[in-house]
Amino acid sequence: MIRKIVIAIVYITTVGMYAQDGTVSPYSFFGIGDLRNESTVENQMMGGIGVYADSVHINLKNPAAFGKLGLEVMDREGLVTYTAGVSNKQYTLKSFTEEEQSSITSLDYLALGFSVGKGLGMGFGIMPYSSVGYNLVDERTVSGNSLTNVYSGEGGLTRAFYSVGYEVLKDLSIGATVNFNFGTLESERLQQIEDVQFGTFDRRSSRVNGFDFNYALNYSPIIKGRNRLHTSIRVNTQGNLVSTNDRQLGSFSVSTGGNIEELEVDLVSQNLKNTELKIPTTTTLGIGYGEDYKWFVGAEYSFQEMSSFENVFLGADNIAYEDASSFALGAFITPEHGSFTSYFKRVTYRAGLRLDKTGMLVNDVDINNFGITFGLGLPLGRSFSNLNLGFEFGKRGTTRANLIEESYFKFNVGLSLND
């Protein structure tokens, strides 16, 4: 039965992975788009922390956690874990004078993990890395004439990854992930002056690909009785992405929308045909405490030198970057995971919060994100498989300096299936 479910998920993913629009955020205008959450529903609902690892769930943020797969439940090779997640995000976008609502449904991840020996686990999968999806209108008066600029963008980057984790000593695990990122970023600006028959357009496209690596070290000793201390250090190395660019300038008919003239810009002479995007290194420190499969509380702090990032081809005049940081707190409790008398005692209850300083300065204003998360892990039969439901309320941005404030509600559904 599990294999049939997985085949269905793979088919749906193959059809939908490249067709989906993963965001409607105006802040996807900047950088390489709106960066997606890189963790499973289980981790997302604990504020996105990745310090906790167990033997039956895949941890996409922490490759060292693959070394624990199958240890407590089988103590031998053979456990296979499948995981997939989808989400629906409801947006309320508010400026100083207007308010709009929108929503988006998208696939978040599809992955497989397996133990290949005592203390050795591997996994691979695919997920969106960033998403672009915006439509912005800027109206102003210039020399007594109404000038309208319409900015739109779509696309994003997809990430394929392979991870391996190994318990080198009791309670000490190391791990590494290689990520290959690829996709296309597209943007367009349409400009129109009131009562002028023709408008102008500026279309840009970047085909991007490149690698980055994630290294992790976990140390999780028993401290007292059954209680365990969880610590981790993770380093996501600088992403070296290569972008092949195209740009077209031209004019269009305002009445029909058809192109009148189109010119391919010679980017080679401007040294912009092939450019580099360097995503700065992110370092994450995590600590937590709890009893395996019973309860846990933990926190993580991440920092990234975003001040060194720039996109010379798709860059904007009103943005600057400074160092980014993130703090997250998360917890779970399972009243009695082995209960035979009460289903709800076997349910896992999760909650968390996070505060992200994104590193983006738009119109000289910091763009920050705050989210509160909670969710349920519902057991499927008597196996170690779960249906995970998650909820997140959050806010990003501000209405100051002619910017947009995003309030959002996100609903996640994830499957974690063990064979």
Image: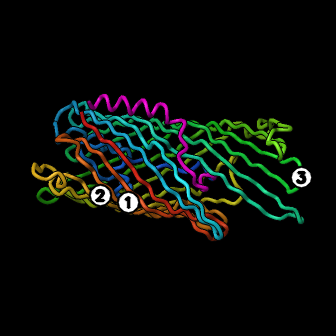
Residue at image mark 3: 196
Give the x, y percent position of residue 236.
45, 47
Sooner in the amino-acid sequence: mark 1 or mark 2: 2
Relative to 18, 234 lies left or right: left
> Please, what is the dominant secondary structure of the magenta stretch?
helix
| Mark 1 secondary-structure assignment | strand
Residue at image mark 2: 350
Number of marks in picture: 3
Sooner in the amino-acid sequence: mark 3 or mark 1: 3
Give the x, y percent position of residue 88.
45, 50
Residue 101 falls in image quadrant = bottom right
Residue at 54% in and 61% down: 92
Q: Amino acid at mark 3?
A: Val
Q: Where residue 24 is drawn, which disc sits there?
A: none
Q: Amino acid at mark 2?
A: Arg
Badge 1 vs badge 2, beta-carbon distance below 8 Å: yes
The Cα–Cα distance between marks 1 and 2, rounded to whole angstroms, is 8 Å
Residue 82 against residue 398 in the figure, above or below: above
Say which of 280 and 369 sits in front. 369
Residue at 53% in and 56% down: 305
Residue at 29% in and 49% down: 218
Give the x, y percent position of residue 179.
46, 38
Residue at image mark 1: 373
